[in-house]
Amino acid sequence: MRRPLSQPAPLPPEADAFFATLEHAIVALSDEDFDRYWINFGRFILAYAHAEHELLRLLRYYAAIEDDVAAVLFAGTRMDAAKRHINAILEAQKQKRVAKRLKRAFDQFGTINTIRNNMLHWEISAHNADTFTISNAFLTPRRKKLRKYRISTTDMEAMRADLHRIVLWLWLERSEHKIDRIMRAYLARPWQYKLPQTSARPKTSQGRRRNPSQIRDQRGSPLRGRSTYY
């Protein structure tokens, strides 16, 4: 006769020690070996939230509406939608110079947003204590849509630095702070984070599959755009 689930079979005395050892090993693997990764991940997410908040503040500024009304109209507005609204407002107001000035920051913010979304929603597996592989393998059954790339603690530090600069950039757009030569040079510096190429299914040529050894794990070139702040 089967024992009801509510009445589990008694465990031997050594079971408690075994489970305690197992739980300790799991905690050690998740918390100690990858401390640097999780610390940088948390700092990156916090910097992203700060930049997204500043973007929404800029949207309210260009929309020129009261905060209580903006809170209703823009409730739930995310980064991509906020950028579209700002660009649409600037186009309607024929502020091409401002739109051009913002484009470089918006482009990098969009790149970081893609990485952030993939880090949160795709599968992550450890490559080593400092580098993880991000993949959408469990989301798509079609091999030609498979995408994966590596993200490291150095990448997260670079994205966080870029986000801090983007926050300053967006704040300056709605402030009366004077932009001096040093500030202009700082905003015009190349971005620290460069979007990596994703590795996907090897391409074929005339029916022949390329040798996997010929497919290199390369990083993409820096995002283009040399426009300075002013």
Image (tube, grey):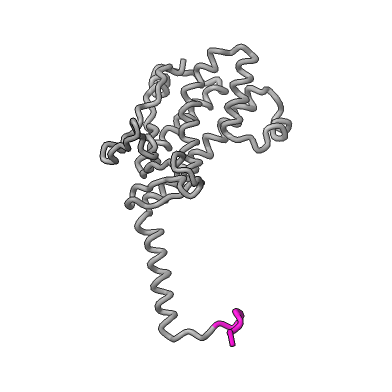
- Is residue 8 at all visible to an observer of this figure? yes
List the single residue furthest toward the bottom.
Answer: 1
Q: Is residue 212 magenta?
A: no
**Which image quadrant: the N terminus?**
bottom right
Residue 98 location (% of width, % of height): 54, 16
Is 116 placed left or right of 95 in the picture?
left
Q: Give percent across and percent down for residue 92.
A: 65, 15
Q: Camera-side residue: 90 or 65?
A: 90
User: Extreme front residue here?
Assistant: 207
Residue bounds of the magenta highlight: 1-8
Nearest the viewer among 182 and 215 is 215
On the image, the x and y values in percent for residue 174 come to: 57, 23
Seen at 48% across and 28% down, the residue is 168
Q: Position of residue 104 (x, y in %)?
A: 46, 22
- Tag count in the figure? 0
- Taking the spot 36% from the left edge, 27% from the top edge, the residue there is 222
210 is higher (above) or lower (below) than 20: above
Identify the residue at horizontal 40%, vertical 41% (top origin).
Answer: 156
Does residue 120 show up? no
The one nearer the camera, 55 or 115, is 115
User: For residue 2: magenta?
Assistant: yes
Give the main secondary structure of the magenta stretch: loop
In this rendering, is residue 204 above or below 130? above
Is 52 above or below relative to 178?
A: below
Residue 193, quarter of the rendered image: top left
> Quick one: which residue is furthest to the left in this view?
213
